[in-house]
Image: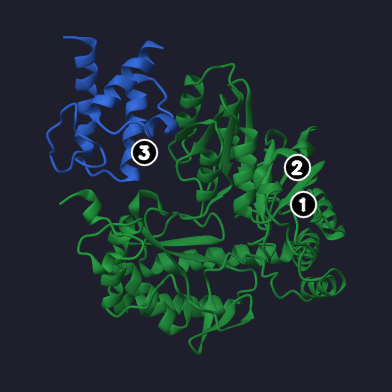
Amino acid sequence: MTDRQQIFDSVAAQIAPFNKKGVELTEATSFAGDLEWDSLTVMDFVAAIEDEFDIIITMNMQAEIETIGQLVDAVAKLKAA
Amino acid sequence: MTDAAETATDTRTPAEVADARDLFSKFDPLIAEREALLATGVRDPFAIVMDEVKSPTQAVIKGKDTILLGTYNYMGMTFDPDVVAAGKKALDEFGAGTTGSRVLNGTYQGHKEVEDALKDFYGTSGAMVFSTGYQANLGMISTLAGKGDYVVLDADSHASIYDGCFLGDAEIVRFRHNSVEDLDKRLGRLPADAQKLVVLEGVYSMLGDVAPLPDMVAAVRKHPNCMILVDEAHGMGFFGANGRGVYEEQGVEKDVDFVVGTFSKSVGTVGGFCVSNHPKFEVLRLVCRPYVFTASLPPSVVATAATSIRKLMHAGEKRAHLWKNSQRLHKGLTDLGFKLGTETPQSAIIAVILTDQTQAVAMWQALLELGLYVNMARPPATPAGTFLLRCSLCAEHSDEQVGQIIGMFEAAGKATGAIG
């Protein structure tokens, strides 16, 4: 399994408790559009991801992240830094 | 159909073209939600008009005498005779307004006097007065933290703190509300050599809970290159031996670099400020855009603020009565079966948590019809998507009024089914 796939799987596991509608998770799944998360859910989820990977995703970065694929890319980059 | 055909032009409004969109289309869900709510016959919680204001605790709304329990007028200074007289005198002597920026023609003797009053009140070497509390946060945060710096803030921070972040160029990092561990962890993940501004609030205004400042300050001091700003908007006047705020009461004055506050709560007028002992503090007057590019406060306002601040230095009895009111209302509402934002009374704010918008509005309207005004608050302003009726007590609420307030909550709660 590639590093990227591992990150994707970890992200998917973190999404699960917030995925109330049981939306299927792909690279293109969007947080606002598909998962229909509000700003409070996003806050809780980002905190969970930060703790899972021991990284910081600043609000500036969050503004650029719309899909799961983009989040996985951001996590990979931040972990490598 | 092309996109162009679906777009309203400046000569054809959306109403004339089916499904047309313009810049207002994004507000359609909110408009629909409000229309649906108001169609049920309730009064609009966000369109109250005070026809007469009789005292810090009483107004007339639609002809009805109403007790005010949602004004943040904690110390009841709005009608203090000395405060009002100072305003009238300044209005006569200096006119209605300054028509200018603090750094150009907008600094009068009164602006210096209110800054001197703040320095005396807070025991600091520097004080800077802004036109509102909102602008004080906007200015301080956006100016202190620049490109490459970090602002670290509590997730439940007031909108003015968030907006200060968005106005500036710094990186923005949030931690979970009042979590010392979360703050510590996030600071530990940031580059050690980067400059960081940690923004905390003494009292969080939605639930009325107080920050554990000593623990938070200790966590911050484990990390290099951090400065601490505490917003005491809801703490000034009420907390601490000198009424400086929660940071004074909790004994962390030496560890706080900047205190931001407002004149629109305990002080009883309008305006904002920051106080600090930093030796270079004065330079902010030249580089802080929300300070420079706006008109200064009118002479009457700064005169009322200066008089009120000096009186608040000796307001121990008022503080004691306000605490008594807060404790009594908290106990009264708890005994009636209401769910409150805090288990114990922590501040002069008591938040009643309701299940949904319908119940919150019904309860709010029932109280208003009984003669009690409280604030209704809803997401996204509230934490965890809750619907709140927020009560803020005043030192001028009499024992009798607090008894009436509890009685009205009982009647409204039973009428709306909010309590059994």
> The residue under label 2 is which amino acid type?
Arg
Q: Does residue B334 appear in the picture of this structure?
A: yes
Name the one closer to the observer, B360 or A77: A77
Chain painted in blue in the figure: A
Q: Chain of mark 3?
A: A
* Mark 1 → mark 3, Cα distance in angstroms: 38 Å
Q: Is residue B115 above or below residue B66?
A: above
| Residue linked to disc 3 | A43
Mark 2 and mark 1, same subunit? yes
For marks 2 and 1, the one nearer the N-term is 1
Chain painted in green in the figure: B
Name the one closer to the observer, B32 or B68: B32
A55 lies left or right of B244:
left
> The residue under label 3 is which amino acid type?
Met
| Residue linked to disc 2 | B285
Q: Chain of mark 1?
A: B
Q: Does residue B420 appear in the picture of this structure?
A: no
